[in-house]
Image (cartoon, helix red, strand yellow):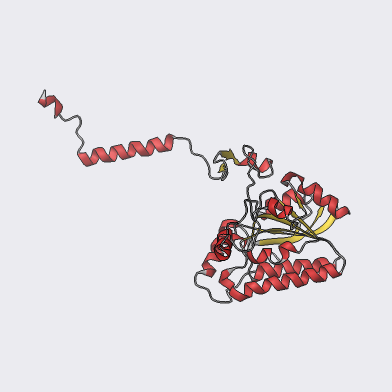
Amino acid sequence: MLKEMFKKTSGLSMSERRQAKKGEHIRKNLDEPQIPDGLFEKCDACGDLIYAEDIASNYYICPHCGHYFRIRPRNRIRMIVDKGSFVEWDEKLETSDPLEFPGYQSKLEHMKEVTNLEEAVMTGKGTIKGIPVVIGVMASDFMMGSMGHVVGEKITRAVERATEEKLPVILFTCSGGARMQEGIISLMQMAKTSQALKRHDEAGLLYITVITDPTTGGVTASFAMLGDIILAEPGALIGFAGQRVIEQTIGQKLPEGFQRAEFLQEHGFIDKIVERKHLRPILSLLLRK
């Protein structure tokens, strides 16, 4: 019996058996069906895995719980403007490193590669149901949509060109605020964009902002809240400083839902909350008026 227990079952050494087992594991993995990257996305709210095409066909809203996914600029533009009408402006405007901030240049290059964008905003001209409009869309996945000198310059140029061509402006905001790697230069963009919008307003032209999640910091404190008409998507986070910072500063607990679109509409900071599927018809209606 003992002989049977310790009897050699094969002519392979221990290391050879380990290699054979490893090979079986590799073959097993190769035999398993491989799911391509990007085929499914996980909803941050309900945690469900959803077919990416189902999300896209539902205006980038979770079909299970109604959570709003953040939208990249090109997808947003496809949803809003007439097909084939959009012409991008200043797409080759490149960000420099004015303060020589450590690691900034390499981070910019990485962001360009990951997002296929040159900066955190895309601007240009298109039509919405035949009405010409200048449009700008911010990208939350490019350094949190932060505003550096190129973001400020692109928005300023778009507004100035809209003023020259006597066109309305629509800006979709989504930002973490001023870009810390550019220091005071990024803060200057708040004044620059605001001045351009003032000249646009003095020319009697319409400016609409659509505030999306999240819009905070210097973007909130400048062009995001300067619209003649201010729209917002449901549940969007909108504020300047973070809730925790404010609570620590004032020593008080803030109200439920503070800094959400619904709270701001209730207190008169937003004109209307618009569901994503209704944005294009609502914008068309506003432009016609």
- Left or right: 206 in relation to 257: right
Tell me residue 239's x, y (percent). 65, 60
- For the point 80% across and 70% down, which residue is it? 198
Using the image, determine if residue 146 lies above or below residue 24. below
Which of the image's four quarters has the C terminus? bottom right
Please say if 274 is above or below 133: above
Residue furthest front as drawn: 252
Place residue 28 in its image quadrant: top left
**Residue 19: quadrant of the picture:** top left
Q: Is residue 89 visible?
A: no
The answer to whether residue 100 shows anywhere in this view is yes
Left or right? Give the position of 165 relative to 144: right
The x, y position of residue 32, in whole percent, is: 44, 35
Q: Position of residue 270 (x, y in %)?
A: 75, 56
Depth check: give the residue in front, 266 or 157: 266
Question: Left or right: 28 with respect to 46?
Answer: left
Identity of the residue drawn at 78% across and 67% down: 159
